[in-house]
Amino acid sequence: MRREEEVNQAIERYADMVRRICLVHVKNETDTEDIFQTVFLKYALSSVCFENEEHEKAWMIRVTINACKDWLKNFFRSHTVSLEQVREQTELLEQEHREVWEAVISLPEAYRDVIYLHYYEGYTAPQIAQILGKNVNTVYTRMTRARNRLKEELGGELDG
Amino acid sequence: MDERIREAFAAVHAEEKFKNAARAAVTKKQQKKMASKSGKRRYVAVVASCLLVMLVGGGWVYATPTASIEIQAEPSLELTVNGFGRVIAVRDFDTEAEDRVVDLSVMHCHYKAAVQQILESQTMRNWLSQGENMEIVIRGQNNSQCEQILSCVESCVSGHGNAHCYRKGWQERGTDDRDEDTSIPSGQGHNHGQGNGHHGGKDR
C-alpha cells in the first residue's frame, strides 16, 4: 500500500483529470464521488511501480475509464439518470463551455474518451489505442466520426 | 473549434469535496489495513510466544531425569531416563569402558532398547559368560515408571541367571545398595562394589 503522502500528491495531480473523465461518462455527482474514491483507493492499494509520470498518468486514465464503465454497467444506474441530472453537472460552467460539454456528452459513449484524450490531453491515435487497449484504426475511425458530429453540433472547423 | 473544446475541458476542475472524499476513503482504508496488520502481528506474537513456551517447556520436561538404571558390572554404567522413557544421559564408572559406551550410542533411545543393546554388547556378554554377577538397580521418583522399568529390565535379563534387578529410592545414592533397608530386590542381590556413587563417574 502506498504512503498517504504519495496518495495525496496523486490526488492533487490527477483530480482534475479524473473529474473530466467522470464528466464525460458519469451522469451525477454522487457517482463521480464514488468513482473518485474507487480510483484513488486503487492507486493507494496498487503495487505498480511507475516508470515515469507519463506511465502513471496513462495508468490513471485507464483505471478511471474502467471505473466509469463498470459504474455504467450497473443496470439501475444506467437507466435511472434524468437529463436534468446531466445538465446539473455542467450548470456551473460558462454558457460557451456548457455548449461544448453538452455536445461531447451527447456523443456515443465510445467516442467521448477519444475526444477528451486527443483534444485535451494531446495524445495521438496510437497512444490512445494503447491506453484504451483498442486497435489504432478503430481509434482513427472514432476520432473522425466524433469530430464530424461535433462539427455538426458546434459548427466551425476542427484542426484535427 | 479545437481551442473551444480544449477550453471547455480546461474549465472543469475537481471540487474539493471529491478530493476530500477520496482522501477520507484512502485514510480509512489505510487505518483498517494498519489495524488488521497490527492484529495479525499480535496474533503471530502470541503464537510465537506459545511455541517458545512449549519448546522451552518441552525441552525442560525432556531434560528432567525421572529415573535411572544402574548396571553394575564391568564396566558399570548408569542410564538416566526421563519421563518419556528416553535415555538422556549415560555415565560410565570405568575409564576403560569409555570407548565401549560411546560405541553403544544409546542416547535418546528408549530405555528398553538401550538396556538390550548394552546387554548384547560384546563386553557385557563376555562378563556374563565368565559367570560374573550383574546387578541392575532402578531408581526413580515415579512409582509406576519404576515398576515399568523394573519389569521391562527383568524381561531383558531373564535369560541370564547371574543378572539381578533391584528397585531403590531416588535419594538413595552413594550408599551400598545391598545394605539399604528400602531396597526392593527383584532377584537375588549381590554386592559387586561398583555402580552409582562408588566410582568417580563420567557423564556423557
Image (tube, rainbow, N blue to C red):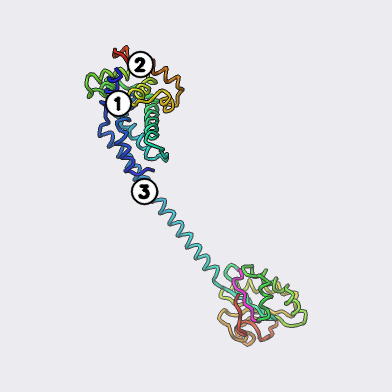
Tell me: residue B190, above or below residue B46: below
Query: Which of the numbered marks, if any, corresponds to residue A28?
Result: 1
Give the residue at mark 3. B35
- Measure how far apart labels 2 and 3 are at the Cα level: 51 Å
| Residue range (magenta) | B85-94
Residue A151 lies in what quarter of the image? top left
Residue A68 lies in what quarter of the image? top left
Residue A54 locus on image (x, y percent): 38, 33
Query: Mark 2 vs mark 1: same chain?
Result: yes
Q: Residues within 10 Å of mark 1 (few under 14, many from 20)?
A: some
Quadrant containing the C terminus of chain A is top left
Give the residue at mark 2. A147
**Disc 2 marks which amino acid?**
Arg
**Disc 1 marks which amino acid?**
Asn
Residue B86 locus on image (x, y percent): 61, 68
- Measure how far apart labels 2 and 1 are at the Cα level: 25 Å
Query: Mark 3 vs mark 1: same chain?
Result: no
Tell me: residue A33, above or below residue A114: below
- Measure how far apart labels 3 and 1 are at the Cα level: 34 Å
Q: Residue at x 39, y 16 (%)?
A: A144
Q: Nearer the viewer, mark 2 or mark 3?
A: 2
* SS for callout 1: loop
Residue A85 locus on image (x, y percent): 28, 22
Q: Residues within 10 Å of mark 2 (few under 14, many from 20)?
A: many
Q: Residues within 10 Å of mark 3 (few under 14, many from 20)?
A: few
